[in-house]
Amino acid sequence: MSNALEDVIVLDLTRDFSTSLSAAFLADFGGRVIRLEFLTAVDQADHQLAPTKGTWDFEADLIHRNKQSVALDPATDKGRELLVELTAKADVLVTDWMMAELAALSLDYASVSRINPEIIYGRSSGFGPKGPDKDLPAIDELASARTGMMPILGQPGEPPVYTGAGAMHNSVMLAFGVVTALIHRQATGEGQEVDTSLFAANMYGASLDIQAFLAIGEGDRFIHPISRLDVSNPMSGSLYPSKDGRWVTLTMPDTDRWWPGLAQALGIDPEDDRFNTHDKRCEENRLELIHLFEERFQTQPGSHWRQVFDEKQMSADVIGRIATSWSWTIPASARSRAWGSPFS
């Protein structure tokens, strides 16, 4: 079975993690992604052509997997000829360079489309191609700060929380836009420009909360962060510390269904008059139940609760964490960037 993008040639002119990863997605599905490495000071911000001996370039392994590469000097006649040749043959160009830089090298959409009218030109930026912020740097944290979500993610009294999710959303959005444009070209023969931005990606990530805000209007839920001890349902979206500091998360919005099993696991009488209805658990005695859960979960370590949840098939888990050290060794072969020639 052939890959979906097997016959698609993609030029990768990227610097930032998010856009480079988007090109890698296209390579994952069979696209022949050729990374352009410029040899002059034009691209001083680009990565080295090879990692330092004895080191593992883990970022390159992630964002440049399955790619080929070509090094050229656009300041020379031969380099410019090769660049024009590649552009004329490519199906897609993916970039995150500033618009002025692209125009100076005749790599802006207007110039590229004159050479290759059918090309799909995918560009990512910080805040879009128009408006007063179009030349601001493409930094995900700055884009995230504009959404209004960061102040409500943390606990009350704590600093705003940056999740870093916008860059990942942006990678998928750009790849999806390019593939959609390829489908359109297949039907019409028309090339087009595809644009995404880190700001748009962060707004997408906040879309559910924004939609709720538009529906409900002004309210404390959308102005102030909510304490984990002030959730509306103690059994849904709530967090509780265990004895060893691991955090337990409960996802049981239908409390009538889950209450008997959870109560028994925590040593609580399911028929306790304070908590024997949904309204009592989530309204009348909500805060009392929250404090009781917090007390009971701290009697056992996270491993105990994970075993209980597995045995009882409960909608709950212990929040995982990445280990701080690794016992395995990365083979030397995995630390090199083994990109093939684009002309092979």
Image: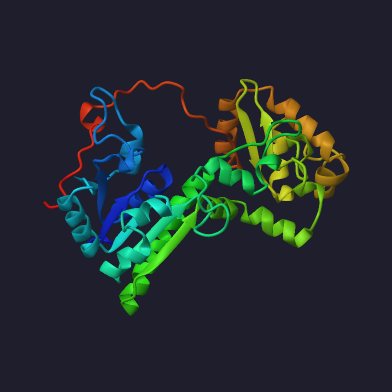
Residue 223 % position (x, y): 77, 46
Residue 284 % position (x, y): 88, 44
* Residue occupying image coordinates x 30% and y 71%: 117
* Residue occupying image coordinates x 19% and y 48%: 76
Q: Is residue 221 left or right of residue 135?
A: right
Q: Quadrant of residue 224?
A: top right
* Residue occupying image coordinates x 41% and y 43%: 16
Please tell me which residue lies in front, 188 or 117. 117
Q: How many marks?
A: 0
- In this view, 74 is above or below 8: above
Residue 146 % position (x, y): 63, 47
Q: Is residue 283 left or right of residue 326?
A: right
Residue at the limit of the structure toward the left, as seen here: 344
Q: Is residue 283 left or right of residue 44?
A: right
- In this view, 78 is above or below 17: below
Q: Quadrant of residue 99?
A: bottom left
Residue at the limit of the structure toward the bottom, as seen here: 188
* Residue 334 visible, this angle: yes
- In this view, 85 is above or below 281: below
Residue 286 % position (x, y): 82, 40
* Residue 261 visible, this angle: no
> Which color scheme did the rendering employ for the protein?
rainbow
Please tell me which residue lies in front, 30 or 49. 49
- What quarter of the picture does the N terminus occupy? bottom left
